Image: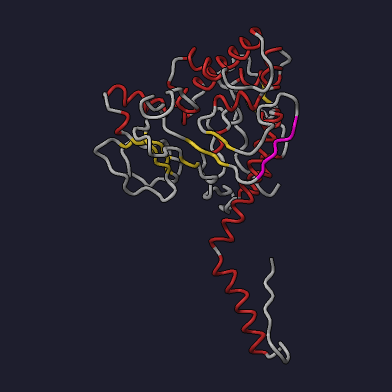
Amino acid sequence: GKIILEPPAAVPIALYKLYTSNDPRAETFRGLLRYFNAGLAMGSIQVDDQTVYQGPPGAFKVHGQIYKRIGPMLPSLPSVYGDGTPKCLQIWFCDADEQADLRVRQDCGVRRNRTTYRRHKEIFQLLQRILSSCGNPLLHRFLTIYEEIERNGTDPDDVRIVIDINPSEGRHPSRFNAPNSTEIFALLPDQTAQNLSKYAILTPMRQSDPRQNPIRRIPDFFSIHDPLLYPLLRPTGQEGWHRHMRITSTNEKVSVRQYTRFNMMQRELHNIDPEDQDHTVQKYCICHLARKLYQQWLCDAWAKVESNDMGWVETHQSALFADQYVNLMRRAAENTTGGGTTLVALRK
């Protein structure tokens, strides 16, 4: 109770009903939540895990590093690389029916007949409408960039997409909402990548060179990490943890460990979707209703905690060693080491 952060926002009522109702379509949705989330995500998660697309309940297991990545907005031409099939973020720029076809083709880990296949496609079509109409700022910004490039007739091969954290005021003409939020914009051929932070993601809008690798890593401390990778947990694009997050009342920094613990706690909410004419009260956070997807998020979040801890140790080596050195010099000055050779034991 010491850490009080912004509570989870209300979600579209149609999505909330998929999480809570006993409708056959909703039960199918909850049983394959990781499959549907992966089909709608704007980035990808790569882990050594065989349970991601398994239908029966199972633990999400990770061995080694978790890789979170994002690629170009548009698929490369077949003459450059691959077969031109859209993936992840790229699917969002196809027409609605083609989007559902591309997403439902992914392996869901269970055998499907025509009826099941058709139901999965209907669920994807419903989820696409929900995410497209709920005001998700990330999706809106990507679609706006795409429309502007199309309208101006600019060659996508000459455009680069930038995702930057904590942008400075007035740095680019196309700002992304409020200060201190993550900025998404396009760099045209006559623009240079100046004043970007060292953590900025810079990728081509479309891969034009088969020798280049356009895939970029999504840093754990980007506030859009969760909205990009977990659209079914963050449908409205509500930002997640970032390094500059603070408690409003005390202005103290919030660690990723504290943020994760805050979101793990079950609280009774009283959220209401403004578009819901029935004013249904959403008592539960959808994270705690997300079954295997919630367990995946927890595993990912704790890996983020450990990575952040190791990062602190790596960047504070001099301070850590200085502390040991000062104690050693103090003991030597006090002559408390006794006779013989002085040995320094390093703790693991």
- Give the image location of residue 333, x and y in percent: 64, 89
Residue 41 or residue 279, whichever sits in front:
41
Q: Is residue 122 above or below residue 31?
A: above
Q: How is the image coloured?
A: secondary structure
Residue at x-position 55% and y-position 45% = 220
* Residue 108 lies within the magenta run: no
Residue furthest top in the image:
115
Q: Residue at x 62, y 36 (%)?
A: 7
Above or below, 85 relative to 185:
above
Q: Give the quadrant of residue 187.
A: top left
User: In front: 59, or 232?
Assistant: 59
Q: How many marks?
A: 0
24 sits to left or right of 5: right
Q: Quadrant of the C terminus?
A: bottom right
Q: Nearer the viewer, residue 82 or 315?
A: 82
- Magenta region includes residue 59: yes
Q: Quadrant of residue 73?
A: top left
**Percent position of residue 30, x then y:** 69, 22
Residue pictured at 60% horizontal, 26% vertical: 37
> Magenta part of the protein: which range?
58-63
Q: Position of residue 215 (x, y in %)?
A: 45, 38
Main SS of the magenta segment? loop
